[in-house]
Image (cartoon, rainbow, N blue to C red):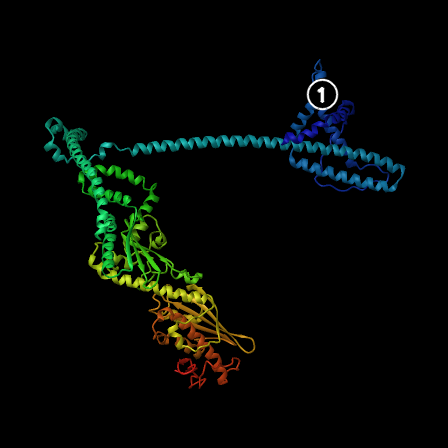
Amino acid sequence: MVNEKSKPAEKNLPKRTSSRRKIDSPQDEPENPPAKSAKTTSKPTPKASGEPPASAKNAASGAIKSSSSGAAKLAAAAPPSSAKKEFEGDVYKILIEHEEEISVNSKPDEDHDKFKETCNKIKDLMISISELKKQDTPEAKAEIGKKRIDVCMLFVTLKRINRFEKYKTKNSREMLSRVRQQVDSYNLQLQNLLYESMHLHKAVTKCLEFKSDDKDIDLVPLPEFYKEAPPSISRKEETEKDPHLQRLARLEWELEQRKQLAAKSEILLKEKEEVASEINKKNEYLDNICPQLETLMKAMIPVQEQLGMSDSKVRKLHKSAVLLPEPLYALFVQLEAYMEASDKLIVVSIMGDEEEARQLKKSSRVEEDNEDTDSDLEDLIQPSRRSRRVKKSVRQEEERKALLQKHPLSVQLLVKLKKYKDSITLTFNYLLKLQVVTVKCSVNMDRELEGSFAGDLISASNLLSELFPNDTGLTSPNSSNFFQLKDLGLDSFHNYVQDVGFPYQWAQKMCGFSFLAETPNSEPVMVMKVDPAVIRGCVPEMIRTVRSRFKARMALGKQIQDFEKGKVIVHTSQKRLFPSKVACNLATWESITWEDYETIPSNQNLIEEGVVHESDKFYKANFSRLNSDGNFAKLTAYIVVKPDYPRVAPVFSLRMHWNTDIDARNSSAIRDMEKEVNVHWRELITEPGWVWGLLSAQMMRVMVCFDVFLEALGCAGTAPPEFSMDTHRMFFRPVKGRSRSLPFKYVPGAGNGRFVQR
């Protein structure tokens, strides 16, 4: 960067040399030395005669003297002989070298002070020139010419200072570059030394940790060695005194023993090959018979069909069942027996890859044989086990997949509904490592449910949840699975249920497993032995429960489907329990989360009493009715649907927005409305078919109570009669008793019935 900046200065060198050669002559050299730069500057006032100030003259004379003195020194140092012409040609080059030497020796502070002094002098001269121009006299013009010369000489001084600064900058950068290179060289040497030191440390550590292979050999005990080894090897008198000779003798005896064992192994291998050849011959004979038997079986199929004895499908199914794991095999046997004896609306089948199941069964037999090997063979296998541990980190992902591996075959159960084309398919899988049975379900609907909230009820993750109390299927009933997952760094089991299925407790019972709960003073206990008696006792109940849940969820989904459209349709058998006309309407229906539900103040009492839980389904319904002034009275219902619906009725929490916000905390009327829906709901299930419309009947009762509330208060004078009384809602007493209770109870009768207080 320094060289590039100095290029423009070199282009103007000839012009400088012409002026400098005049100065460099010894005749023009001033005798007085250059004036020293002052640290403080002052602005001198111009004289009346128009002469330049003494500071300007001194600065100019100092610049001339410095350059001329350098030239004089160079002239004195030049040879007086024939080299004079050569010296005159290199004057400028020598001058530059001389200035570089001066710049190196000069101090930056002095250059800075000199620069400031020169600038102040130029400023003073320019001020005096400006004042002389105002006088406009011949003497002033002559004085202006002199001052201009002084200013030019001061500019020469500035250029000289600038050159000095450039020389210093260049020298500083070169010095910095040299120091950097030296530091880099030192750093490189340091790194080399550190690397060499580390290498030496490793070599020393390796030498210190070196272990001979003979230390890993398990030698026979010393008394046994002296007892069994021949005297030519043991040399008892010599080896007892010298441990080294004793070690060598024991190793020699170990080698001799291994040679004998190797000879025996070769004999046994030959015998094994002979037996294997005989087995292969018999297998070939059997393989040749199998095609003939299959051909015979195919030829017999028409005869069996003619005689009504077609069992080829059953035989094929039974052939596949042999490959099932023990829990699924026991389940298949009991389901098939129940299907043939009691329930023709279920279909049992086996799905999966039979060839893979055969390979898995063979490999499991090989593993069982390997577990029965002698302890001596286990000692010999120990080094290979060490090598497997080394590869464990590399194969960690494969081990995770192996832990969640399912058996290639699964049992599929199709459960149909009577008088309906809808059905549900349950697929039972067995996890080989975790030793639990999981279930996946799929729904086959004759007519799909519309709406997102209705379809969510029959999804695979919700349909069978809590089929029995607290059985969500999100945690494994086998307590050892927690530690198996933890050892491999996996999350809890519920993160993998979408892939492997839900391990419901009722599914374990159907497969004969009995997992016991943890006791306070003992570890988890489980019974892994499959018990057919357990399966026979629970299979009929489980199928009835699954069919009942499926039917109930279908009915609930159809009701919610109507709610999403703003309709509340009561089942035909329940219509007589309500008046023929309702004034309010259902404005909106939406699903909410547990977090939204627990933030409502009016719901806190239900949460504290344990009436609702996080596993329930939560909905929000908004009802509205238009009054005579064109305003709306609104009622918001927070509905909790239990997983065991309709055995447990939905729970309603009401909140009204009319003139003010009221709920069960500050209004007895709202409490009475909630009581009608949550307590007296059994009055709605007296007629057959109530399963298909319990929630709709409760919603209709809320709407009827909402109309009665608005109309009764207006008739009693408690509130302005904003809502006209409908002829379909007849009540004799709008309010009754000290509590001013409203007539929410509907009594069917002649005409439209009537409303009375309870």
Quick check: 129 above or below 693? above
Residue 2 horizontal side relative to residue 330, left or right? right
Residue 439 horizontal side relative to residue 654, left or right? left
Please tell me which residue lies in front, 278 or 639: 278
Q: Residue furthest top?
A: 82
Residue 629 spot, x, y in % from top left: 56, 77
Residue 410 spot, x, y in % from top left: 29, 51
Please tell me which residue lies in front, 391 or 718: 718
Residue 77 spot, x, y in % from top left: 69, 20
Quarter residue 420 falls in: bottom left
Q: Residues within 10 Å of mark 1 (few under 14, many from 20)?
A: some
Quarter residue 44 falls in: top right
Q: Residue at x 28, y 33 (%)?
A: 210
Q: Secondary structure at mark 1?
A: helix
Q: Quadrant of the N terminus?
A: top right
Quarter residue 228 falls in: top left
Q: Residue at x 52, y 82 (%)?
A: 721
Q: Is residue 104 visible?
A: no
Residue 131 horizontal side relative to residue 429, left or right? right
Q: Looking at the image, how many numbered discs can be counted on the residues?
A: 1
Q: Quadrant of the C terminus?
A: bottom left
Quick check: 506 above or below 362? below
Q: Is residue 482 visible?
A: yes
Q: Residue furthest right?
A: 138
Quick check: 157 above or below 570? above
The amino acid at mark 1 is Ala
